[in-house]
Amino acid sequence: MTLETKKGSLFSRLEAEGYEEVVFCFDPNSGLKSIIALHNLQLGPGLGGCRFYHYPSEESALDDALNLAQAMTYKAALAGLDLGGGKSVILGDPQKDKTKSRLRAFGSFVERLSGNYITTVDSGTSPEDMDVVLETTRHVVGATPTKGGSGDPSPMTAIGVVEGIRACAKFVFGSTDLTGKRIALQGMGHVGLPLAQQLAELGAVLIVTDTNKNHLQIMSQKLKAEIVEPNEIYNVKCDIFAPCAMGGVLNDETVSKLRCQIVAGSANNQLRSENVAETLRAQGIVYAPDFAINAGGLIQVAHELHGFDRAKAEGKTRKIFDTITNILTAAEREKINTSKVALRLAKERLEKSPSKLR
């Protein structure tokens, strides 16, 4: 999915891109400002995380919610889950503005949607935050185990990304072995860190960057990773570039700097526009579509809805290897970019499935 700015009225965009509902939530008592976006609910209720982020504008917060909700539709469809596309954002700095009263107020708005939206953790929120949200709504997954949740889904997301990277390596290099492969990892957050740890255990040579330099320094020492400045990560000579921070990092400028053969990471909405997928293909760079490779966390929390079994969730997550392999093979056969293939496969499942909520 992309972060390309859309022109025209809000309703024309909702109609053109298949959104079903957008809820603007404001609670004067707590100061909560939140947006809940529901994209396509053909397969089931929208399940997606609550992102707490200090957006530069209300418009950018809305754009993020809409883009993320749409990506969740295709992520769930491609992962074989009976879920739709939903996402929420809370406007504010999570380090300063996140309070229990705001989280409870957010939960109240989720409850009003009567199960059409199920929330969980995302950037800026944690399983402990979901414990608080649970106080005002039943429609939460990803809370702490003491509250009946499966906990932080980030390590499971990382497992799926590793499987996707291995699939790309098999496709490009002829082997899934990552020993000695140079991987440039952008972002050492909730997913980036466990991903880096898993890759290091598999023998990869890591080059890492993050905006939190203190955290980065400590973790890089443990992983024996080389550190570069955030704006230098695109120029690193490597085998694989793994975007694991915020979306929109792949644009014409950054892609022109890449010195890798594979792009495969955990970030959502990595492409600034769909044209970037074609640019990557033209440059001979294999791209693992973000909503295909990063579905592990969604798979984990989705399993909570029917009785959580970590082994089963991990088993399904590891099938991301097959999903990415199928996408790469089809793209090569049809001589089109991988993003087009992934979108087509997701939309085909949506078209063939009867509505679960109608």
Image (cartoon, helix red, strand yellow):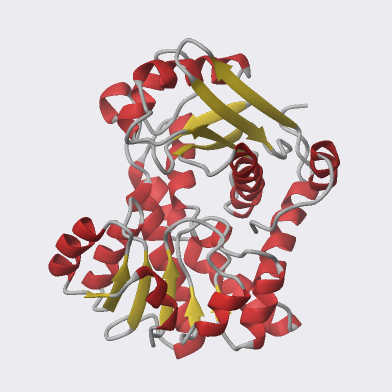
Q: Does residue 94 appear in this view?
A: yes
Q: Is residue 7 above or below residue 125?
A: below
285 shown above or below 356: below
Identify which residue, 228 or 18, lies in the foreground.
228
Q: Is residue 205 left or right of residue 3?
A: left
Position in image of residue 63 (x %, y %): 65, 45
Work out whether residue 83 can be spotted.
no
Which quarter of the figure has residue 240?
bottom left
Total marks shown come to: 0
Q: Residue at x 35, y 22 (%)?
A: 99
In the orientation shown, which residue stands out farthest toward the top? 29
Q: Residue at x 43, y 47 (%)?
A: 297
Q: Where 207 sits versus 355, above or below?
A: below
Query: Residue 215, image x and y in percent?
Result: 21, 56
Position of 116 relative to 312 (above/below):
above
Relative side of 129 to 28, left or right: left
Q: Is residue 20 left or right of residue 126?
A: right
Residue 258 percent location from the top left of the image: 49, 83
User: As rendered, which of 56 and 316 lies closer to the eye?
Assistant: 56
